[in-house]
Amino acid sequence: MEIAFVRVADNLARFYITDSWPAFANTIRREMISGVPTLAIEDVRIYDNTSVLFDEMLVHRLGLIPLRTDLSTHVPKDQCSCEGVGCPTCTATYTLSVEGPRTVYSNDLIPQDSTSAPVHENIPIVKLTEDQKVVVEAKAHLSTGRNHAKWQPTTACGYKNYPVIVIDEQCDGCGMCVDDCPRGVLATENGKVVVVEGRLEECSLCKLCERACLSASIGAESSIRVNPDPTRFIFTVEGDGSLPVVAVLSTAVANIRKKATDLETILSDVSGREKP
Ligand code: SF4
Ligand code: SF4
Ligand SMILES: [Zn+2]
């Protein structure tokens, strides 16, 4: 199996996985969404809230603010030496104190440790009018998307099979499929339809081209056929900024490896056979 990156930025990555299979591609997708820990606000002490939002709604909004996460310094509470009491290794603390009239933004959340600051400065939390006030202390800890969506490090994470387009000899270059393709993948050239250079990966496998060809041709077979390659996948991953997308992928792969090793150990214990 091979992974090749086409595009890598802090919050966006596009990569191919080749020589793999659908179950494994889906395992990677699921682990990136729900198995990689990030920080999110979980406990809030409200000293004052005279805004129009109920305490619960205010706390819910605070919980959804993406926070910068450093997996090398923070550990989940249940693995911390403080035994879940809460210390700087497992808990990030924030204070927020704002008086109206003005909007409370995510940058009003002041972290005790600046490395755990909110990712974005301008996420609106609540609009305060004259004499309204919000004063809270919030604590964030590490967890995963399996427990709540607020701990997901990705905002979009999906894949599609690599498209395989075959055009046969019967094609007369009528261009009907070119007109119907919504992604600009096809063009006519020298009386034949061809795949535009560099556009193949944009194909969504919608098969509108096949349908257009069928309605245009006299025969019962389409001259263009589009099929998914079951061994090759195109991934697009967008992060919420709490972790770089590459760190999300590498942590997900490490988790899968650990689970596979644990399973091997359990199976060898049960069967009494040596691990392969
Ligand atoms: S399957 Fe859809 S996107 Fe792909 S070439 Fe055909 S019409 Fe275009
Ligand atoms: S619709 Fe069929 S015959 Fe016409 S250009 Fe496309 S593949 Fe060729
Ligand atoms: Zn701790």
Image (spheres, rainbow, N blue to C red):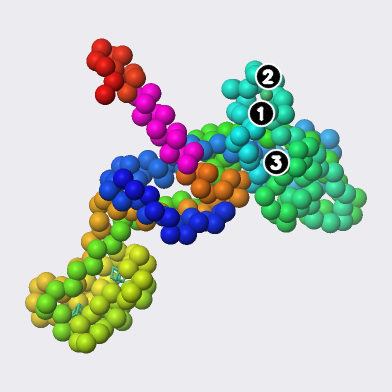
Whether tag 3 and tag 1 are in contact, CB under 8 A, the answer is no
Residue indicated by mark 1: 90
Q: Which mark is residue 116?
A: 3
Q: Is residue 68 magenta?
A: no
Tell me the CA gap for discs 3 and 2.
19 Å
**In the rendered image, is residue 58 in sight?**
no
Judged left or right of residue 25, residue 273 is left
Q: Amino acid at mark 1?
A: Cys
Judged left or right of residue 103, residue 144 is left
Q: Amino acid at mark 3?
A: Ser
For the view shown, which residue lies furthest in the right direction? 131
Looking at the picture, does residue 125 appear above or below residue 87?
Answer: below
Tell me the CA gap for discs 2 and 1.
8 Å
Q: Tell me what residue is drawn at x 80 percent, y 55 percent.
A: 103
Mark earlier in primary sequence (3, 1): 1
Q: Amino acid at mark 2?
A: Cys
Mark earlier in primary sequence (3, 2): 2
| Ligand 3 under 8 Å from disc 2 Cβ | yes
Q: Tell me what residue is drawn at x 71 percent, y 34 percent.
A: 92
Residue indicated by mark 2: 82
Instruction: Indicate the secondary structure of the residue bearing disc 2.
Output: loop
- Which quadrant of the figure contains the C terminus? top left
Whether tag 2 and tag 1 are in contact, CB under 8 A, the answer is yes
Looking at the picture, does residue 182 appear above or below residue 164?
Answer: below
Q: Quadrant of ligand 1?
A: bottom left
**In the rendered image, is residue 131 in sight?**
yes
Category of crowding for the residue at label 2, using alpha-carbon neighbours closer than 10 angstroms: few (below 14), some (14–19), many (at least 20) = few
- Front residue (pair 241, 17): 17
| Ligand 3 under 8 Å from disc 1 Cβ | yes
Q: Which x, y percent locates residue 124?
A: 72, 54
Q: Is residue 262 magenta?
A: yes
Magenta-drawn segment: 250-263
